[in-house]
Amino acid sequence: MVMSSAIVALFLSDFLLLQQRFSAPPIQELTGQEAGVLQATVQYADIKTVVRGSTRIPVMELALTAGCTAPVRVHSIGLRRVGLGYNSDIAAMYIERGTQRVSGARGIDNRDGSVVLHVRDVVVPACGTETLTILADFAEDAAVSGQHRFVLHDQDPIQSTADTVHVRTVNEPLPLQTASSSVRGTLTVTPLSLLQRVQYGSAQTVARIRLEATGNDRHIVSAIRFTNQGSAQGNDLQNFSIVTAQDGRISAITPAMDGSSVYMRMSPPLVLEGGANRMLILQADVHVGRSKTLAFTVEESGDVFSRVRRGRD
C-alpha cells in the first residue's frame, strides 16, 4: 500500500489541528416535537491549493444536530465533485469523526462526479450534535492546475432515520487547485506477519508493520490509525502502544479501541528521511480468549497522519 503525505500551504502538525481549518458556526437549536428531525450545518474548508499526491485534505465539515424527540442514525452522505478537473484526480474520499474514520474510502467513479459515502456507527443523540469531517486524497498523477469543488449532492444528500433533514450552508466552497510542483515523496506501509500467536495477557504483540519513505523528502508522522478486522472491539484490548526494537515505546498509550479502530499518537512525532524505513510493533493488553479474533491493519492511506518537509532542511 502506498501512502502519500498530506501537503497543504500550512503544514498540519497534528491531526487535532485539523479543526483550525474551520471556524465553529452557530448551530440552531432544534426543539420541535417532530420525531427524527436532523439539521445539517455545512461549512467548507478555505484551503485553496494542494500538491499532487496529497492526502487527508479536509474539504467539508458537517455539524449534525438531532431534534429532542429521538436520536438519528446517519446512513450515508452523498457528494459531488465539480470544476475544471478530472474525477480520477481524486484518489479517495472518506469521513472522520474526531480521530475515528466512520466510512470506507471511495474514489469518484460516476461520470457526473457523484459519490456516496456509507457511514457506520454514527448516531446523533436527541438534542445532541455530532461533527463529521469529509476528507480527500489526491492522486499522484492528478492533472496540474485542475480545479475541484466538493458539494453535497443535489437530491437528498444525507440519508438517515430522520423524517426531515434541513441543510444550512455557512459559506460557499472554494475551488481547490492542484499545484504545478512535483509530486511529494510517499510512505509505504507493509504489513508483517506475527512471530507468535497472541496470548491472553499484558503487552502482547497484535500487529507488525514496516513504514518506508521514498524520494528525498523528510516525513514527519504524528499518528497512525489501526483497524481490527476481527471481532474484538472496545475494551477487549487495552493500553495500546507502538514500540520499536531500538527505542522501545515511541507512542502515547491509548487506553482502548474506539469501536474497531485505535488511534495511536506518536510521542514525539516519528521522523523518516527519504529512503529510510522503520519496523513498528503494536502492543496491547489482551483481555479476551479465542472467542474473539484479532486482525489489526492500516486500512487506508489516510490512516497515516503525516506531513512532509522538502529536502533535508
Image: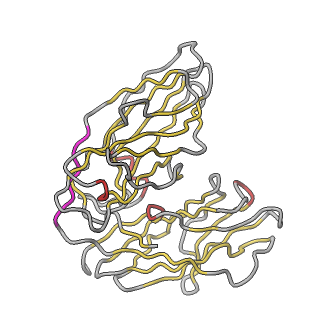
Q: Position of residue 16 (x, y in %)?
A: 43, 53
Residue furthest top as drawn? 33
Q: Nearer the viewer, residue 14 or 225?
A: 225
Q: x, y (%) of residue 66? A: 54, 26
Q: In the displayed structure, does residue 6 sit left or right of residue 221?
A: left
Q: Identify whether 44 is placed above or below 190.
A: above
The outermost residue toward the front is 111
Name the residue: 46% across, 39% down: 77
What residue do we see at 67% from left, 64% from top? 239
Residue at the spot x=79%, y=74% of the render? Answer: 199
Q: Is residue 249 above or below residue 58?
A: below
> Does residue 293 appear left or right of residue 250 in this picture?
right
> Within the image, what quadrant is residue 89 found in?
bottom left
- Seen at 38% across and 57% down, the residue is 56
Q: Residue 255's x, y, as percent?
A: 65, 59
- Magenta-highlighted stretch: main secondary structure? loop
* Horizontal relation, residue 127 to residue 211: left or right: right
Q: Is residue 306 magenta?
A: no
Residue 226 placed where, x, y %? 57, 64
Highlighted range, magenta: 173-180
Classify the position of the C terminus by image quarter.
Answer: bottom left
Residue 36 placement, left or right of 88: right
